[in-house]
Amino acid sequence: MKILCGARPKLILLCMMSVLFLSAEMVSAAKVKEFDRSGQLIVTDKSAADQQVQPVYDIKNRPKEKTFAVPRPPFSEGAFPCSQCHKYMKPNEKRRTLTEYHTEIVLHHAEGERWCTDCHNLVNRDKLRLVSGELVDFTESYRLCGQCHGDKFRDWKVGVHGKRTGDWNGDKQYLLCVHCHNPHDPKFKALKPLPPPDRPGKAGH
């Protein structure tokens, strides 16, 4: 009997804590308006925990990438469209030294992990290929470069990296990455330093 009486206050306290917990959970629940995949608006009651669950990123239905006004890419004379030659050639995915065509191209751009068809689409050579498999025009090559060089892509979009011309508060034109960097060998060659300028008032000047 003493054991039961001693346990009763603990039982009452436990029940009160459960009620408080449930009440708090009910207060934090809210009606959430969402659109399902068919576009229908649905309203559901969701607890605070459910509301914090992040939606799965759907790559097929992601927002459309913003496009930028850019000049024509700096193609070699007569090299584009690529399909004018490649439509007669059987695609060859094998990593190799080019001996028949494009012999002037030597890949120095993560060459241990990359090959031509990682960026150039194997079937439609007039398009570039993103990691997701999406095909983009050469005028959107910045999206291809931005997959690996995210910090440079971010800076390019806001005008910190690269060059853009036009109106300060109006239309602008952005130079593509390939207007300054060779995509197959993008690193700038070392420049020989020039001598310092002469000090004003120096004798003989």
Image (tube, rainbow, N blue to C red):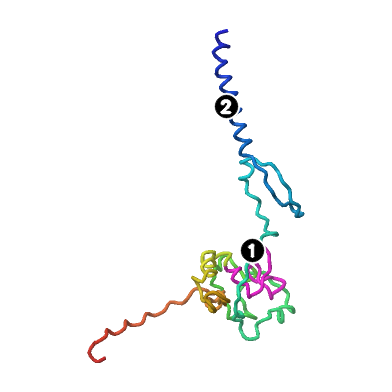
- Hey, which quadrant is residue 73 in on the image? bottom right
Q: Is residue 91 visible?
A: yes
**Image point 61% across, 76% down: which residue?**
69
The residue lying toward the viewer, choosing from 123 and 43, is 43
Question: Quarter of the image containing the N terminus?
Answer: top right
| Image spot of residue 188 (x, y percent) | 47, 75
**Image point 61% across, 83% down: which residue?**
76
The circle drawn on residue 17 is 2
Which residue is at the far left? 203
Q: Amino acid at mark 1?
A: Val
The local crowd at label 2, few if under 14, some if 14 to 19, many if 20 or more residues have their Cα within 10 Å, is few
Residue 51 as seen in the image, left or right of residue 152: right
Q: Is residue 106 visible?
A: no
Which residue is at the far bottom? 204
Q: Secondary structure at mark 1?
A: loop
Q: Which residues are magenta?
A: 118-145
**Image point 66% across, 73% down: which residue?**
137
The residue lying toward the viewer, choosing from 60 and 55, is 55
The residue lying toward the viewer, choosing from 113 and 196, is 196
| Image spot of residue 154 (x, y percent) | 53, 66
| Image spot of residue 11 (x, y percent) | 58, 19
Closer to us: mark 2 or mark 1? 2
Residue 62 as seen in the image, left or right of residue 148: right
The local crowd at label 1, few if under 14, some if 14 to 19, many if 20 or more residues have their Cα within 10 Å, is few
- Hey, which quadrant is residue 140 in on the image? bottom right
* As drawn, 5 above or below 89: above
Residue 103 as seen in the image, left or right of residue 192: right
Gap between marks 2 and 1, in whole Å?
52 Å
The circle drawn on residue 131 is 1
